[in-house]
Image: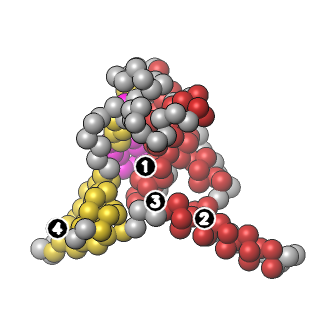
């Protein structure tokens, strides 16, 4: 994040507790939660403020514990000049990695599956148009709900406000842990 970035001058992002880390990080946490299929139970994070042009913090390094007992590492460096977006999940039977980039001139998220039992590497490019997909699902839900007045209607679960609240709760816990020199912080639960 620097003064030439289009989001730099937006006042609500600058005034937001957690600043640009919260604004951008919520999307990366959503991707992580979707990829692992599990909520994050607790975090232990260190935060720092390197780029004084943006509100603090601009860096988070966190260990996290999933509700299923697995653990991982989350790193968000808002002050780097060479950004890289990567999710990597290592399991008993292989690794799945999703990385923002290009394949054959097509921008998107490159998904790679490396299977330990089979010497196979699968690759495919996923769209970077997540917001457009979310808006289409939201508009479709509104349209269907309007047409089905009085009947039970189930909206696309990934568009529920509680999903965004869960993502924010993870970053909020990371920011809290950062102020406590990395002490473990339980992530607020949103059970329905």
Q: Which residue is drawn at 32% across and 50% down?
A: 85
Disc 4 from disc 2: Cα separation: 38 Å
For residue 34, which numbered disc appears in the image?
Answer: 3
Relative to 82, 128 lies left or right: right
Q: Which region of the structure is painted magenta?
A: 59-73
Looking at the rendered image, the disc whose residue lies closer to the viewer, 4 or 3, is: 3
User: CA separation, marks 1 and 4?
Assistant: 26 Å
Disc number for residue 135: 2
Which of marks 2 and 1 precedes in the sequence?
1
In this view, the mark in front (3 or 1): 1
Q: Which one is closest to the eye, mark 1 or mark 4?
A: 1
Quote the CA–CA distance across marks 4 and 3: 23 Å
x and y, in percent, of residue 96 in the image: 28, 63
Q: Is mark 3 on a helix, strand or loop?
A: helix
Q: What element carries label 1?
A: helix
| Mark 4 vs 3, N-terminal side | 3
Q: Which of 101 and 115 is in front in this view?
A: 101
Is residue 146 at least partly visible in the picture?
Answer: yes
Q: In this view, does 116 lie above or below 63?
A: below
**Mark 3 touches mark 2? (CB < 8 Å):** no
Give x and y (percent) for residue 134: 57, 64
Name the N-terminal-most of marks 1 and 4: 1
> Can residue 182 be spotted in the picture?
no
- Quarter that holds the C terminus: bottom right
State yes or no: discs 1 and 2 in contact (Cβ < 8 Å): no
Q: Name the residue under label 4.
A: 116
Side of 191 where 126 appears, left or right: left
């Amino acid at each position: 994040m620097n003064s030439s970035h289009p989001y730099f001058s937006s006042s609500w992002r600058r005034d937001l507790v957690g600043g640009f880390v919260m604004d951008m990080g919520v999307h990366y946490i959503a991707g992580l939660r979707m990829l692992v299929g599990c909520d994050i139970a607790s975090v232990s994070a260190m935060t720092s403020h390197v780029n004084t042009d943006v509100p603090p913090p601009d860096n988070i390094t966190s260990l996290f514990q999933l509700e299923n007992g697995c653990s991982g590492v989350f790193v968000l460096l808002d002050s780097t000049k060479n950004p890289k977006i990567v999710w990597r999940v290592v399991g008993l039977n292989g690794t799945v990695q999703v990385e923002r980039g290009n394949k054959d001139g097509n921008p998107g998220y490159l998904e790679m599956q490396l299977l330990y039992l089979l010497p196979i590497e699968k690759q495919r490019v996923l769209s970077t148009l997540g917001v457009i997909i979310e808006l289409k699902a939201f508009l479709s839900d509104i349209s269907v709900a309007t047409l089905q007045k009085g009947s039970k209607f189930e909206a696309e679960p990934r568009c529920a406000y509680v999903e965004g609240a869960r993502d924010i709760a993870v970053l909020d816990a990371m920011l809290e842990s950062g102020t406590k020199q990395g002490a473990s912080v339980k992530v607020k639960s949103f059970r329905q």
